[in-house]
Amino acid sequence: MPVLTTDAESETGIPKSLSNEPPSETMEEIEHTCPQPRLAQDGGILWKDRNMCAASVLGDQKEMIAPSISSSILHMTLTAPAPFADESSCQCQAPHEKLTIAQARLGTPVDRPVRVYADGIFDLFHSGHARALMQAKTLFPNSYLLVGVCSDDLTHKFKGFTVMNEAERYEALRHCRYVDEVIRDAPWTLTPEFLEKHKIDFVAHDDIPYSSAGSDDVYKHIKEAGMFVPTQRTEGISTSDIITRIVRDYDVYARRNLQRGYTAKELNVSFINEKKYRFQNQVDKMKEKVKNVEERSKEFVNRVEEKSHDLIQKWEEKSREFIGNFLELFGPDGAWKQMFQERSSRMLQALSPKQSPVSSPTRSRSPSRSPSPTFSWLPNKTSPPSSPKAASASISSMSEGDEDEK
């Protein structure tokens, strides 16, 4: 693609954005050899050769890949971290045409990606950092994201101490999927020489003025040059917020690490605090045991309640059966009454005397005595006693008659 070389610069030395005027006659054909993004945005395409160029129009349009390099494209996900800038820098000799934001959003130029730069400290790399880089990566249809990370010296000088050292912060950025290239020891304030060296088209950062290094806004000259693209901060998460949580709950985290095997010396904890923390850990363990016992007791009580409910149901069923059987035996028309009546009649029959013969044997008469009278108390053959009371009355009358005869 024809590339316009221009010397138009702003007061700060940064080239101004070109207007929509047609290019002049002083144009020469130079092929771009800029590195391509690690992963295309709509197809998961990974480039084997970073120094190849392809015509790629993303978004709603169909993707068009140069036939000569179509065999160098793999359809796969990322399997390696992003390179450092000093290991894989842009060696393209063609001068970059200065773009406007509107032009870049339309997908131009088609022969190279739009090079977007984002910088920061990225201490304790978290989701807010990742979301900011995702926004920077997706600003334009075909973007190549360069991320600058400041060194420990610059950060400690202008911002303060960090939790992670610079090597750890570099590695954290390399393993973010949105990052195509990491620039180590990035400058605190962007200079024209730095922008030209890395062929940066736009700078992405949140729009809040960043006052530092004696300036009210270190991105002021970038905004004036039309190279600034704002991103949105993620509310509720920041490195300062994470450090605040740790400082606020310092005792909790100190006890946590002591429990995990760290020594008091490693945690910079005094002897008294160490004993205090260990005692608190023991108290927490006891509380946990008590809590477990309570939970087990609740489970046991629940099981007993379930079993007692079943026992009550069975008892009710058995009690109904028992009451039914009792009424069947001892009720008004029960079998026990009939059996009792039968046994009563048998007892009455057993208590009643046997019947006497019709004529009693004659006694031998003595000459001095008169014949014995007839006993009137003997029971009649045709009228047996009707009840035990009658039988007892007859027996008593018999005894009285015997006394009278004597």
Image (cartoon, rainbow, N blue to C red):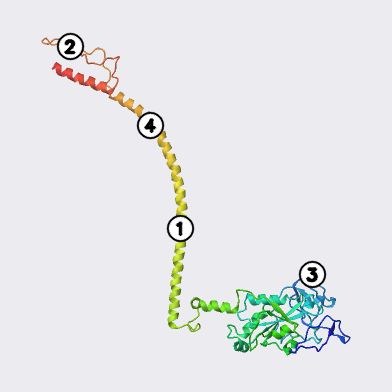
Contact check, label 3 and label 4, Cβ < 8 Å: no
Read off the residue under disc 2: 373
N-term-proximal mark, 4 vs 1: 1
Q: Position of residue 353 (x, y in %)?
A: 27, 21
Task: For label 3, count other residues whose C-alpha is less than 10 Å away and answer few (under 14), some (14-19) or many (20+).
Answer: few
The quadrant of the image that shows the N terminus is bottom right
Give the number of the disc on residue 300. 1
Give the number of the disc on residue 92. none
Secondary element type, mark 2: loop
Looking at the image, residue 47 sits to the left or right of residue 311; the answer is: right
Task: For label 4, count other residues whose C-alpha is less than 10 Å away and answer few (under 14), some (14-19) or many (20+).
Answer: some
Instruction: Find the distance from the CA under tag 4 to the CA under tag 2.
Output: 50 Å
> Mark 4 belongs to which amino acid?
Trp
Instruction: Find the distance from the CA under tag 3 to the CA under tag 4.
Output: 99 Å
Nearest to the eye among marks 4 and 1: give it: 1
Instruction: Find the distance from the CA under tag 4 to the CA under tag 1.
Output: 47 Å
Instruction: Find the distance from the CA under tag 2 to the CA under tag 1.
Output: 94 Å
Instruction: Find the distance from the CA under tag 2 to the CA under tag 3.
Output: 149 Å
Question: Residue 177: in sight, yes or no?
Answer: no
Read off the residue under disc 3: 60
> Mark 2 belongs to which amino acid?
Pro
Secondary element type, mark 3: loop
